[in-house]
Amino acid sequence: MDYVKEDDTVVVRLDPGEQVLDSLATVRDEFDIEHGFLTGIGAVDSVTLGHYDVDDQEYLEEEFTGQFEVTSFLGNIGPDKIHTHIQVGTRDFETLGGHCSGARVSGTFEVVIHLGETPLTHHLDERTGLDVFDI
């Protein structure tokens, strides 16, 4: 992994075999990131997707393996949580997407984190069972 901070932006490049969320946690800790929104693209060979069932208040997760193009990676990063969603494309040009609980880089993975000033801490929303921004 290589990364650089430029004013209010952090640019990250991940290498094959690296875990995306673990790597982003390392960057967060290195720069004491309390508020950031992120975007990325790349390639993964393993991804764990989640879908939140609001009625049951639980995530349903499934792991997928293969060669995937990351067509969209979006989320936010704060002192207590990294929350991301991912869309991946298959060789047949079909897509899978959802909450990203994990992903392993197969080729490269490029992420840009845009920093802000309001800390993105979370609290439990009793109505939905979700951790939401505490703002």
Image: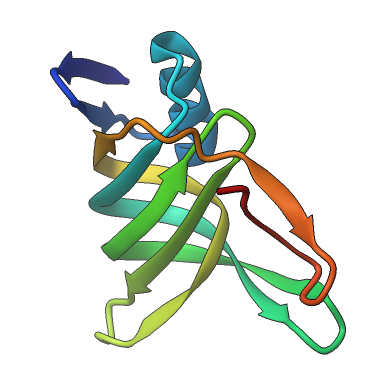
Query: In terms of depth relative to the viewer, which is nearer, 23 or 38?
Result: 38
Total number of numbered discs in the rendering: 0
Query: In terms of depth relative to the viewer, which is nearer, 89 or 129?
Result: 129
Relative to 70, is 83 on the left or the right?
A: right
Relative to 116, is 84 on the left or the right?
A: right
Across and down, in percent, residue 16 comes to: 35, 34
Residue in the picture at 81% in, 68% down: 129
Residue in the picture at 45% in, 23% down: 28
Across and down, in percent, residue 77 comes to: 46, 39
Relative to 13, is 133 on the left or the right?
A: right
Query: In terms of depth relative to the viewer, which is nearer, 120 or 46?
Result: 120
- In this picture the colour scheme is rainbow
Residue 69 lies in quadrant:
bottom left
Residue in the picture at 30% in, 34% down: 116
Residue in the picture at 51% in, 40% down: 120
Residue 105 lies in quadrant:
top left
Above or below, 24 relative to 30: below
Furthest-top residue in this view: 30
Above or below, 40 relative to 63: above
Across and down, in percent, residue 12 comes to: 25, 29
Above or below, 129 relative to 34: below
